[in-house]
Image (cartoon, helix red, strand yellow):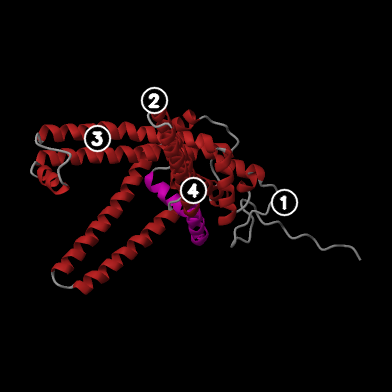
């Protein structure tokens, strides 16, 4: 583990270490994910109930069996209801994003502490990262608003070209917008991959955190991009595995329910047990996603950072004179000065 603080890890080394840390801490990471799930429900359920109550109060003739077109027409006829539903939707989205941000920050704090040899509890991880949730939440909103604005303006221009009869130009511009969004998304994914840990661990403000995150990746875009792609593929693999396991659980559950047909209580118990198993499997599959970015931060902070803070202090402790902590393009080991040339030997 300490080798992570002594040399620059390539994509495959980091992936191997991230899977190792994930497996060793899988149950605690699942608890982080379960807390996120509970927080999301706390936000979603009241907003959903409020939305149903508003629809029932504002539209007495509303019927769930109506066609979608009729429902839309009824809701669209009441501007007060539309504004209220939009507000509830915004509150739900903001609350869900905030819960996700806080959880990701807490996981970063937990993993960094683990690597530093400090065994903190989940409660302590949330407590230490909660004060940094606000700048991280604002950064997340800024990034989301940037992409939404860019996509909206691009869509409007495409619609204008199409309405003027320039269909070929509209298609070409649509391709340009799509390519630009993909390019920007990749840049954000790579250059801001350590951002959460930078905000939480380095305690930098929004703009300084963005610049510092960029500095940790600058010059090593391809290796970081490859690492993030591998991390996404592994997360996707976990999700696929979870899907197959859930299909197996559902199949076994269906057979058991059929066997105990007529025994309502037992069927209910089987159904609840199946639901718990499916939720547990999905939680396990989703817990890996926050590990790679935290691990990337630790390695890049130790090798490319500003040589201040807990990671830098611990890295300096393990970097003795014989360590070769060099980057692919660095002629001088990290945090060291070149040794003077040795005098010529006197042996004959």
Per the image, label 1 sits on a secondary structure element best described as loop
Tell me how far mark 4 sits from mark 1, CA to CA.
43 Å
Residue 328 x %, y % = 60, 61
Report the mark closest to the observer, 4 or 2.
2
Mark toward the start of the polypeptide (3 vs 1): 3
Mark toward the start of the polypeptide (3 vs 2): 3
Residue denoted by label 2:
265
User: Around disc 1, counting alpha carbons within 10 Å, would you say few (fewer than 14), some (14 to 19), or many (20 or more)?
Assistant: few
Assign the C terminus to one quadrant of the image.
Answer: bottom right
Report the mark closest to the observer, 3 or 4.
4
Mark toward the start of the polypeptide (4 vs 2): 4
Tell me how far mark 3 sits from mark 1, CA to CA.
61 Å
Assign the N terminus to one quadrant of the image.
Answer: top right
Per the image, label 3 sits on a secondary structure element best described as helix
211 magenta-colored: yes
Residue denoted by label 1:
322
In the rendered view, would you say 255 is above or below 157?
above
Mark 2–mark 1 contact, CB under 8 Å?
Answer: no
Task: Classify residue 169 by image quadrant.
Answer: bottom left
Q: Which residues are magenta?
A: 206-231
Residue denoted by label 3:
48
Residue denoted by label 4:
241
Is 44 situated left or right of 75 in this image?
Answer: right
């Amino acid at each position: 583990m300490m080798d992570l603080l002594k040399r620059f890890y390539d994509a495959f080394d980091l992936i191997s270490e991230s899977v190792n840390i994930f497996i060793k801490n899988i149950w605690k990471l699942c608890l982080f994910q379960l807390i996120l799930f509970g927080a999301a429900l706390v936000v979603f359920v009241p907003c959903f109930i409020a939305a149903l109550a508003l629809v029932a109060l504002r539209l007495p003739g509303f019927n769930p069996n109506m066609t979608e077109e009729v429902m839309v027409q009824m809701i669209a006829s009441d501007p007060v209801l539309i504004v209220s539903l939009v507000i509830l939707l915004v509150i739900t989205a903001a609350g869900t994003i905030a819960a996700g941000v806080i959880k990701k920050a807490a996981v970063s704090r937990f993993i960094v502490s683990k690597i530093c040899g400090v065994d903190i509890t989940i409660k302590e991880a949330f407590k230490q990262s909660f004060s940094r949730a606000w700048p991280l939440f604002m950064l997340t909103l800024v990034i989301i608003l940037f992409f939404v604005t860019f996509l909206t303006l691009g869509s409007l221009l495409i619609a204008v070209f199409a309405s003027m009869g320039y269909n070929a130009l509209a298609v070409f511009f649509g391709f340009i917008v799509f390519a630009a969004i993909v390019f920007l998304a990749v840049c954000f994914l790579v250059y801001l991959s350590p951002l959460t840990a930078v905000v939480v661990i380095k305690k930098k403000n929004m703009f300084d955190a963005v610049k510092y995150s960029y500095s940790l990746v600058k010059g090593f875009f391809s290796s970081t991009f490859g690492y993030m792609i591998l991390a996404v593929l592994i997360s996707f693999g976990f999700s696929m595995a979870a899907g197959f396991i859930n299909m197996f659980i559902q199949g076994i559950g269906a057979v058991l329910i059929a066997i105990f047909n007529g025994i309502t209580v037992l069927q209910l118990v089987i159904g609840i047990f199946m639901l718990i198993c499916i939720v547990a499997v999905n939680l396990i599959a989703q817990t890996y996603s926050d590990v790679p970015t935290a691990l990337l931060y630790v390695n890049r902070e130790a090798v490319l950072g500003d040589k201040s803070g807990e990671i830098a202090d611990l890295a300096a402790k393990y970097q003795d004179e014989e360590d070769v902590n060099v980057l692919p393009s660095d002629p001088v080991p990290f945090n060291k000065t070149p040794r003077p040339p040795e005098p010529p030997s006197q042996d004959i």
